[in-house]
Amino acid sequence: GLMAMMIPFPFYLAYMRKHSWFYVALASVLMLGVVASCSRTAMFVGALEFAACSVLLLRKREKRWPILAVYVGASIVVGVFAIVSFEKLKDVFALFIEEIDAISKRDLLFINGMKQFREYPIFGGTFFPQGEYVPWDWAELESFSSFFPPRWHNTLVQIAASCGVVGLTAYVFHRVQTVQLFLRHRNVENFFIGMFVVTLLAAGLLDNHFFNVGPVLVYSMALAFVENIDQSKV
């Protein structure tokens, strides 16, 4: 998921600097890494993000042929590799193909999360619930689970179940502040940072990214950049 969120930044460099084909190639490598992870949510939002950034770049850059050459070359390389290594790739993506139409029982998580919200509507049932509706723990390491609780795999369901109406109100207020922040500081840099934020929020509809240390740490730094980018002399 975090790798998918990073895709806009090579595109920003491709938009702003010479030799844009190099940065497009870097973004393509990131996208291939996302595909190799077999993370369905990351693949879906990453592909949409990659396509949106590609369209913007091709519309704004005058020299499009080097960029198009990267896309064509990457497609040929991936296609040949897929044919040559078909059997190995089939084993790697076996589980992904088997569960392509499923969402890893997330629908049950969402239902139980909302049941917990109805049981504790004001302040929620905390991030470490002890009642009837405890989300299944996907981690096998006790040292991990004792620090990171099992979660509901949806940002809004998580906040509702864990923090209730009070938490939802705070989150909506934060989202309004975020929109105002981007509208107040409109420039190229913040557009690509905004793509990162949108990817995080979209992936958070089916995953825990907004409550993981890595993604939300980068998210916090990104908002600081948005707020102060106009003061930068770089």
Image (tube, rainbow, N blue to C red):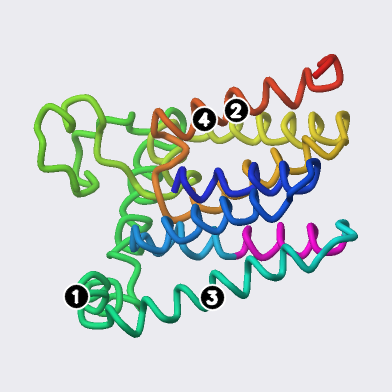
Going from N to C along the chain, the mark reached first, 2 or 3, is 3
Is residue 140 toward the left or the right of residue 196 in the image?
left
Circles 4 and 2, Cβ within 8 Å, touching? The answer is yes
Q: Secondary structure at mark 4?
A: helix
Q: Secondary structure at mark 2?
A: helix
First in sequence: mark 1 or mark 3? 3
| Residue where numbered disc 4 is placed | 167
Label 1's element? helix
Q: Is residue 194 magenta-colored?
A: no
In this rendering, would 219 be left or right of 11? left
Question: Measuring 54% from the left and 45% from the top, which residue is drawn there?
Answer: 5
Tag 3: amino acid: Ser
Residue closest to the eye, 71 or 57 = 71
Give the spatial CA distance, label 2 vs label 3. Answer: 45 Å
Q: Earlier in the sequence, mark 1 or mark 2?
A: 1
Whether residues under marks 1 and 2 lie with C-beta atoms below 8 angstroms apart, the answer is: no
Residue indicated by mark 1: 91
The boundaries of the magenta stretch are 48-59
The secondary structure that dominates the magenta segment is: helix
Decide which of 200, 34 is in the foreground and name it: 34
Q: Earlier in the sequence, mark 4 or mark 3?
A: 3
Which of the two discs, 4 and 3, sits closer to the camera? 3
Q: Residues under labels 1 and 2: Cα distance?
A: 45 Å
Identity, as a three-letter code, of the amino acid under mark 4 = Gly
Q: Around disc 3, counting alpha carbons within 10 Å, would you say few (fewer than 14), some (14 to 19), or many (20 or more)?
A: few
User: Quick check: 69 above or below 106?
Assistant: below
Q: Amino acid at mark 1?
A: Asp
Looking at the picture, tell me which residue is in the foreground, 60 or 178.
60
Residue 149 location (% of width, % of height): 25, 33
Give the labeled residue for mark 3. 75
Cα separation, mark 4 vs mark 3, equals 45 Å
